[in-house]
Amino acid sequence: MHDIEPYYHWRHLYTAEADPRSIFFGRTYSEFEFSQTVYNYYIHPQWDEFGSKTLYLKILYTDYDAKFAIIELIGEWNDTIENDIMELKREVLDKLMAEGIIKFILIAENVFNFHSGDKDYYEELYEELSDEDGWAVLVNFHPAAQHDFLLRKLNRYIELMEISAWRTYKPEHFFQFIDQKLSQRLGL
């Protein structure tokens, strides 16, 4: 896991550590000092910690005018023990929503396990975003991780999408592609 870096080809367009409105503003990163782990596995030092012991993220792009953020995730999403949805919502998504962000693209191809817990925070997130015509999407969630997610019907609150070539898009085109797909799917 230590060699899986957050996607970096949009860094010339946006970095959360240089964005004064970002919760990660001012952070500095080491390229060589590996200190964060998911269980016994070190992860690349470019990933950001937000309160979970098993799930890390990187805000790849935020557009305050278009009201969207693209966030990449790595690790294990564990709502049973760690209540990761609460940490993610309270420590990251709520703070972005306070800055006007209402549409979230969560890239989950590096989330290797998912363990469900209560639906409360998913419902709360869905209601808050729906009130603002917003949404949240999990992109490329591993099929094994999707099993429990679908079993608990959490896709009612966060949409699931498979987009294998997302890296070929510029961030605003990636957002427009997903926004259009959701508009068609939801009949907006």
Image: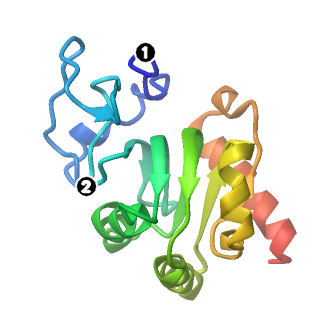
Is 128 situated above or below 78? below
x and y percentages locating residue 74 in the rendered image: 46, 38
- Residue 10 visible (yes or no): yes
Given contact means CB atoms under 8 Å apart, are the residues at marks 1 and 2 in contact?
no
Is 20 situated above or below 132? above
Nearest the eye: 29 or 133 = 29
Residue position marked by numbered label 2 in the rendering: 51
Residue type at the position of mark 2 = Gly
The label on residue 59 is none
Res 154 → quadrant: bottom right
Model colouring:
rainbow
- Per the image, label 1 sits on a secondary structure element best described as loop
Nearest the eye: 98 or 153 = 153
Is 31 situated above or below 16? above
Distance from disc 1 to disc 2, alpha carbons, whole Å, reads 22 Å
Residue position marked by numbered label 1 in the rendering: 3
Kindly identify the residue that appears in the image at 33 percent across and 29 percent down.
Answer: 40
- Per the image, label 2 sits on a secondary structure element best described as loop
The residue at the far top in this view is: 32
Kindly identify the residue that appears in the image at 74 percent across and 45 percent down.
Answer: 143
x and y percentages locating residue 48 in the rendered image: 29, 40
x and y percentages locating residue 1 in the rendered image: 44, 22
Q: Residues within 10 Å of mark 2 (few under 14, many from 20)?
A: some
x and y percentages locating residue 80 in the rendered image: 45, 65
Quadrant position of the C terminus in the picture: bottom right
Residue type at the position of mark 1 = Asp
